[in-house]
Amino acid sequence: MLPTPNKFSVVAGSAEGETRLTAFDKALLDAGIGNLNLIRVSSVLPPGCEYSPKVEAAPGSLLPAAYGALVSDEQGETIAAAIGVGLSLDAQGMIYEYSCKGGREEAEEAVARMLREAFAARGLRLQRSLIKGVERRVERVACVVAAAPLWY
């Protein structure tokens, strides 16, 4: 079993590229996690995890992260992604991501609703939410990404 992460961030980015993959890569760079190897995880924030505004990891590090992303090549379309981390004083937190054809506010509202539902389903008290979203109007090939990286 891997060690339990004790730090987390909430990041979002967007970018254009020549291809879907390069747009995704550039969006990760814009979010500050483009030089790391992401390991996609689900939605539980370990108890006692501390928030840090910036990811502290060496290039090439393996980085657990819950994330949502959307790529589009529909010129003129608006795409969005958001990440939400719900915190509890006495238990684990929860992480939810959302991406859509639409605006940042829609994506942020969706993760806020999902966090409330997740806490209610577990009988936990939601103390605070950290939510970050991003939107982009597509020119060629665009990507939006929102993530909650976890590290040690």
Image (spheres, grey):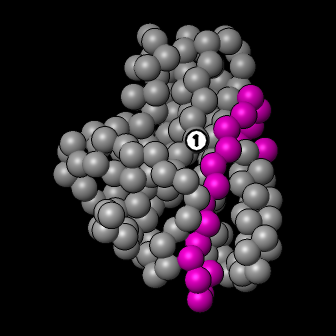
Q: Can residue 152 be seen? A: yes
> Where does residue 92 sit, x and y in percent of width and height?
56, 76
Q: Residue furthest front?
A: 1
Where is the N terminus found, in terms of image quarters? bottom left
- Would you identify the image quadrant in which residue 85 lies? bottom right
- Would you identify the image quadrant in which residue 141 lies? top right
Q: Is residue 136 above or below residue 84?
A: above
Q: Can residue 132 be seen? A: no
Say whether residue 77 is magenta.
Answer: no
Task: Between residue 61 and residue 41, name the one nearer to us.
Answer: 41
Residue at left offset 45%, top offset 61%: 9
Where is the C terminus found, in terms of image quarters? bottom left
Identity, as a three-letter code, of the amino acid under mark 1: Gly
Which residue lies under the disc numbered 1? 68
Residue at left offset 63%, top offset 40%: 81
Residue at left offset 60%, top offset 52%: 83
Say whether residue 105 is magenta.
Answer: yes
Position of 128 with respect to 20 (left or right) is: right
Position of 147 with respect to 113 (left or right) is: left
> Where does residue 70 sit, x and y in percent of width and height?
60, 30
> Where does residue 10 sit, x and y in percent of width and height?
50, 58
Position of 92 with respect to 104 (left or right) is: left
Q: Residue furthest bottom?
A: 90
Q: How many marks?
A: 1
> Where does residue 132 sit, x and y in percent of width and height?
60, 54
Q: Secondary structure at mark 1?
A: strand
Task: Between residue 113 and residue 74, name the one nearer to us.
Answer: 113
Q: Is residue 69 above or below residue 72?
A: below
Task: Between residue 61 and residue 121, name the one nearer to us.
Answer: 121
Q: Which residues lie in the magenta part?
A: 88-106
Residue at left offset 58%, top offset 58%: 43
Rate crowding at label 1 as few (under 14), some (14 to 19) or many (20 or more) other CA atoms within 10 Å: many
